Image (spheres, coloured by chain):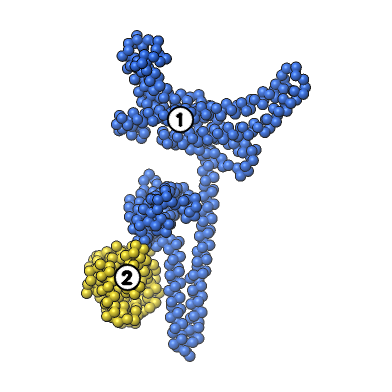
Chain colours: A yellow, B blue
Amino acid sequence: MRVAIAEDLFLLRDGLTRMLEAHGLAISAAVDNGDDLLTAIRDDKPDVAIVDVRLPPTFTDEGLRAALQARKENPGLPVLVLSQYVEQLYARELLAGGTGGIGYLLKDRVFDSAQFVDAVRRVAAGGTAMDPEVISRLLARNTGDGSLSALSPREREVLALMAEGRSNAAIAQRLVITERAVAKHTASIFLKLDLQPSDDDNRRVLAVLAYLGG
Amino acid sequence: MDPARRENDQVPPRARARRGVVAAVHGVGLFVIALAGLGSLALMLLSIAGPAFLAGFAVAGPSWEGGTYRFVLFGSAVLALATLVPLLITATLTMMRGLANVTRRLSADWCGVPISAAYRPRPANRGIRARLGWQLTDPATGRDLLWMVANGLVGVFLAAAPAVLMFLGFLGLTRRVFGGGPFAGAAGPLGGDQFEWLVVSLLVMAAGPGFASVLLRGHALLARAVLSPSNAAELARRVQHLSQTRTETIDTGAAEIRRIERDLHDGAQARLVAMGMTLDAAGQLIDEDPRAARALLLEARDNSAKALADLRNLVRGIHPPVLADRGLTDAIKALALDTPATVHLASDLAGRPPAPVESAAYFAVSELLANVSKHARASQAWVDIRYADGMLKISVTDDGHGGADPVHGTGLRGIERRLAAFDGVLAISSPPGGPTAVTLEIPCELP
């Protein structure tokens, strides 16, 4: 699998490159600004692009705009956006296309390289990787009006992990329960929230996110 | 053409007539105020002239009553001048100031002619001498006095004219209809013809409401000419306002820096210290007990994540990233996404206001939206951002239970203080039972 990286801080760019290479991923390009990333993607299309939100020259949301632009030029191109902070507004903009292959994570998540590489692989495969902080804020906002009060605490945990974009197997492993139990919980959640059940993992995640983002 | 008149042209005749009658009634009110002004003027003159006259009488008057009487008379006059007169003077001056302020308000409310006031701030000392000194040295007091005179000589006629015209017309009509009244014996203006009497009476009666708004406007303009503070007074007031808001801004800034220092000290700094210690312990254990060392390393990693989270929250409180990235509209959009209530956002902001204004407006809205969910228990809120005529206007309305009190709410007071640094203002309407509507206005340039 080939990865393009756009990160302006040399230490982080270098660290990311080494970490991904250590996990057997190839780096197709490592650049420090949005324009170079777009050029690199045009020249040599990677399987996934990892982009920092804040990039030169403006040091605002340059990276986010580059990511959205890259996806416009290459529909379906998996993009993982990294940031020092996560904003629901930006999560929404990334998800607005309604297609998968989107990740939005805090930079801290690179501390756990196994999990991080798992997220990269998931996004590259067309899945979703939303930061737990985005999800917890979405859940906090939705508990207020009681729409989630019908869920049991366990179901809420499953919902949060599902919204992050994790598969049933990953959820089972995380909560130390069987996959069948996870499947039972998800079925119950979809019933209670009145959502269309779907076998496709990614469609399922997007439905949940759309529901929470309401 | 001024807006009031242009507006008048589009009003249907009936509403115009009603408006004229209302203006005539307002005129009566202004007339009464002018009389009260004359009254207070007279009272003040009497309170000075009375004892002065007594004293003069005691000194130079006829001597047939003997020395004791003269002494008592002189003594009481001096006593009155020393005690009662200052009291009466400050009382009448206070009354005049009140009347002038009523005129200011009514000119703005009824005629659309705002008149600013620039009285010097009230002294801390509440004694009669301090109070008198404060009133007598204020140039605005002279303008109050002048207004009482001008209003009594000219203002009264402008104010009373519409009602008087209506009354005269009415008297003329009563003569025509009932054949009585004060004009019973008079001949008609065109030789006693009854029909002409009727026409003239009606015309006179219509002239009252017809000219009422013009006359009242004249009254208001006269009031403005007399009561408007001089440039120097206006500047003095401005300087006073600026030094007060500057002090508050500096205080707020200093408090903010202390809070940041404390947050860093208790948060990220403490975690980094803990991390260093954990790493050191891990380094010592790594050879003899790799498993324990590994656990410590994981702990250090968690601590670094927590330190980052602390810093993130701190940054959010200083300068929210979305505000820096995208500006006010998107930053408030992001805020809305984090608010439990459903927030409807409308914005016509084309450019970006100066960064300090943007930041002040953002934190004001942030505080208001927090109030919406915390205090008002509202399910919906509306945020409206507009820019017109050099003024950034933001209104936040909710469907909650109202009852927000700017006097007791430290949050609202804090917003007010922060906005004051930009000459911004905050207006709150929050009747018990709701809804709460808060509007903030900040003058600024939009590039």
Question: For residue A176, what is the image quadrant?
Answer: bottom left
Give coordinates of residue B217: x percent, y percent.
41, 30
Q: Is residue B339 above or below residue B306?
A: above
Q: Residue at x 39, y 77 (%)?
A: A111
Q: Which mark is residue B29?
A: 1
Does residue B122 appear left or right of residue B309 in this picture? right
**Residue at the extreme top:** B191
Give coordinates of residue B140: x percent, y percent.
55, 35
Visible in this render: residue A3? no
Mark 2 burial class by Cα count in 10 Å: few <14, some 14-19, many 20+: some
Give coordinates of residue B331: x percent, y percent.
37, 59
Q: Which mark is residue B292?
A: none
Q: Is residue A117 above or below residue B140?
A: below
Give coordinates of residue A134: x percent, y percent.
35, 68
Mark 1 burial class by Cα count in 10 Å: few <14, some 14-19, many 20+: some
Circle nearer the viewer, 1 or 2: 2
**Residue at the extreme bottom:** B288
Q: Are marks 1 and 2 on the same chain?
A: no
Q: Residue at x 36, y 71 (%)?
A: A132
Q: Which residue is mark 2?
A: A151
Q: Mark 1 falls within which chain?
A: B
Q: Mark 2 falls within which chain?
A: A
